[in-house]
Image (spheres, grey):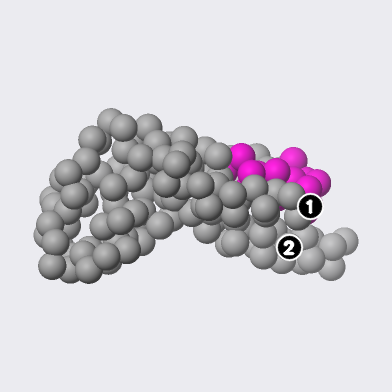
């Protein structure tokens, strides 16, 4: 329960802890606005920091839920690959100034800054655990 509270706290203090001009941009009427001016290096650093915090907490949740090191090892690889693909995609979209629409950027950013992958991995590992017990 403490780990889930920690995930909530990361979200609750996002404005104080992280540089992200897109928080306000996506909250407001962004359809009629151009993308905000941002520092790419600071944005990258803070997105990496936030993603890492969420990932470490998520890995702890996965470990305590299943106590299976193979699940944690797989999750680490998954999180690293996901971050690499998502951050490159996000910055390519920003370089194009959202000309192909804002929704793709909105959802890519969402996967980077929120711990959504743990919501996918927990049921997947639970199912894997159930099916492997039935085989034995």
Q: Which mark is residue 126?
A: 2
Secondary structure of the residue carrying tag 1 is helix
Q: Position of residue 18 (x, y in %)?
A: 41, 40
Q: Which mark is residue 55?
A: none
Q: Do the CB atoms of the residues marked 2 and 1 lie less than 8 Å apart? A: yes
Name the residue: 29% across, 52% down: 22
Query: Real-space Cα distance between discs 2 and 1?
Result: 8 Å
As drawn, is 114 to the left or to the right of 101? Answer: right
Q: Nearer the viewer, residue 127 or 91?
A: 91
- Could you classify mark 1 by the number of other residues whose Cα lies within 10 Å: few (under 14), some (14-19), or many (20 or more)? some
- In the displayed image of the protein, which residue is found farthest to the right? 136
Name the residue: 57% across, 43% down: 55
Q: Is residue 75 magenta?
A: no
* Image height of 27 relative to 17, above or below: below
Magenta residue span: 55-69
Q: Position of residue 77 (x, y in %)?
A: 55, 40
The number of callouts visible is 2
Q: Nearer the viewer, residue 51 or 75?
A: 51
Residue picked out by circle 1: 66
Does any portion of residue 31 appear in the rendered image? yes
Secondary structure of the residue carrying tag 2 is helix
The main secondary structure of the magenta stretch is helix
- In the displayed image of the protein, which residue is found farthest to the front? 16
* Image height of 9 relative to 80, above or below: below
As drawn, is 133 to the left or to the right of 23? Answer: right
Q: Nearer the viewer, residue 10 or 53?
A: 10
């Amino acid at each position: 329960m403490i780990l889930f509270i920690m995930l909530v706290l990361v979200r609750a203090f996002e404005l104080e802890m992280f540089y992200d001009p897109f928080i306000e941009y996506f909250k407001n009427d962004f359809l009629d606005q151009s993308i905000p001016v941002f520092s790419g290096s600071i944005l990258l650093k803070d997105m990496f920091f936030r993603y890492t915090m969420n990932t470490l907490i998520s890995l702890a949740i996965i470990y305590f839920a299943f106590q299976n090191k193979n699940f944690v090892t797989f999750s680490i690889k998954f999180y690293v690959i996901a971050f690499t693909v998502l951050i490159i995609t996000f910055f390519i979209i920003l370089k194009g100034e959202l000309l192909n629409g804002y929704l793709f950027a909105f959802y890519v950013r969402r996967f980077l800054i929120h711990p959504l992958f743990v919501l996918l991995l927990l049921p997947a590992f639970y199912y894997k655990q159930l099916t492997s017990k039935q085989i034995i």
